[in-house]
Every structure is written in structure tokens, then in C-alpha cells.
Amino acid sequence: MHIVVMTVEMSLPGCRSLKEKRQRMGGLHERFGRNPAVAVCESGALDRLETSEWTFVVAGIDGRRVEALCQEIEDKLQRTVDGRVLEVTREPL
């Protein structure tokens, strides 16, 4: 079993309220949480408007598939979130 904990920090320039932050980050649970190999949660910067931190736990039997899924998540975040990815850390368990 291969498990990777991936933490993504994103910048949300110009975000003026927690409501706007939720709208800009909206749907991450629904988009990624449907996959049974992925668990996702907002893990930091909960009350900071211009920053958002999310953690994804990706598990699978094949290490290459787990790595590919992590890359897919990162790519999709860069394409779909109204902000920019500042930092991505991956920690294998």
C-alpha cells in the first residue's frame, strides 16, 4: 500500500471575505472526494482571506498510480481554482 499526504498552499489575491474564499475554492470536496483513493480537507489558513491550505491523502496499491493521481490533482487545481498555487509538499507514509 502506498500513501502520500499532499499539502497545497494557494494564494487568493484580492479575496475580501470568507464567503468569497469559499466560492473561489468551492467544490474541492466534491471534485476530489468522490474518488475512493482520495481524502481531502481544508487544513490551514482557515480564517485568512488571501491564503488557503488544503491537504489530500492519496492511497493505492501502485506507487506510480498514486503519484499520477497527485499530479492530476495539482494540475486540476492550477486550472480550476481562481488563485495560484504557491507551494505543494508531498510526504510519503
Image (spheres, rainbow, N blue to C red):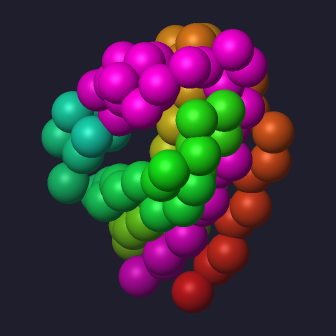
Residue at 57%, 86% (x, y): give it. Answer: 93
Q: Position of residue 87 (x, y in %)?
A: 80, 48
Task: Indicate the quadrant where residue 30 lies.
Answer: top left
Q: Residue furthest bottom?
A: 93
Chain part drawn in magenta: 1-28
In this view, 11 is above or below 9:
above
What residue is at 67 percent from the left and 75 percent from the top? 91
Q: Is residue 21 left or right of residue 78?
A: left
- Residue situated furthest front in the rendering: 16
Can see residue 31?
A: yes
Residue at screen point 55% across, 70% down: 4
Front in this rendered view, residue 62 or 21? 21
Q: Position of residue 28 (x, y in %)?
A: 35, 34
**Is residue 55 something that shows in the picture?**
no
Instruction: Find out whether residue 44 is within the magenta segment.
Output: no
Residue extending furthest toward the right: 86
Q: Tell me where residue 89 sits by quadrant.
A: bottom right
